[in-house]
Amino acid sequence: MGGGQSKPAADPLIAEWRKILWGQKEDLQFVKNYQPYNNEVKELRVLLYGLCGAGKSSFINSVDTVLQGSITRQVPTDANSSKSFTIKRRTYKINKEGPVTFYPFVFTDIMGLEKCDQQGVCVEDIRLDMKGHIKDGYKFHPYCEISEDDQYYNNSPTLEDKAHVLICVIDASTVEVLDDESKKKMTRVKLAARDLGIPHLAVLTKIDKACKEVQSDVKNVYKSKYIKETMEKISVDLGFPLNGIFPVKNYNSENKTNDDIDSLILCAMKQIIDSGENFVNQL
């Protein structure tokens, strides 16, 4: 007590622990030039899932924004909803050099997971979607998976109907309070992807909300002790390797693009495309 000095607060920034080429155009050119090698696949299918409000739809909009060079809002979002704003399966394409030309990859958006049973998308529906059995327009039912006699059930999926890479979208600001039931559901999805051989990556969103140092400068993401510890916790809790977790800042309040925000999104996209391309070429 008495005259003792208070212990100084730990430095929130540490030595850079992952390298990234900020503002460079290599990843942008890679994404823009990508073409599937497998002739059976005209479009690489990226299936996104995650808890409600994690930022799945916003990530699609952010990728679209990066590639268009201006803010886009193709996918409807709701920042204030505690329930999944997405209730139907929908696949989104991104325009390339005109309204009738598209990039050779698509994003499939689905209802969000919720911790309670009979709320949010069924894990079995995610597994069936990975296998290509669910068509666009299907309205998810939290209490049961799609039936084989449903008009939106695809009885004979082709390789192009199936998911080629699965992305778990995780809100960095809620990782510390991720409940056991949510972890169990996310782990079940991960195991289903493993059984199907589908590559599975994690995109960590809202890094600016989770860490004030990143909020002040997004280039602090790989110097942030908090972000590093958050990624380590995700790795332990959900089984993702650290090099399979990609922190990003989605575009939400910005009215113009930012090279540093783009760099993180493009880094994630390069790995997503690489993983999906490897998967379809090994079939």
Image (cartoon, grey):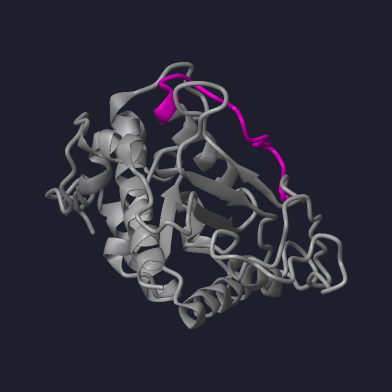
Is residue 66 something that shows in the picture? yes
Residue placed most toward the observer, 70 or 14: 70
Q: Is residue 83 magenta?
A: yes
Q: Which residues are magenta?
A: 67-84
Residue 107, x across and y down, in percent: 55, 47
Residue at 46%, 28% in the rendered image: 96
Give the left or right position of residue 94, taking residue 29 as reference: right
Residue 168, x across and y down, in percent: 50, 60
Residue 249, x across and y down, in percent: 41, 38
Residue at 68%, 34% in the rendered image: 76
Instruction: State the quadrant of the N terminus.
Output: bottom left
Residue 93, x across and y down, in percent: 56, 38
Residue placed most toward the observer, 197 or 222: 197
Q: Is residue 263 magenta?
A: no
| Up/down of 265 relative to 3, above or below | above
Give the left or right position of residue 262, taking residue 46 as reference: left
| Up/down of 193 relative to 273, above or below | below
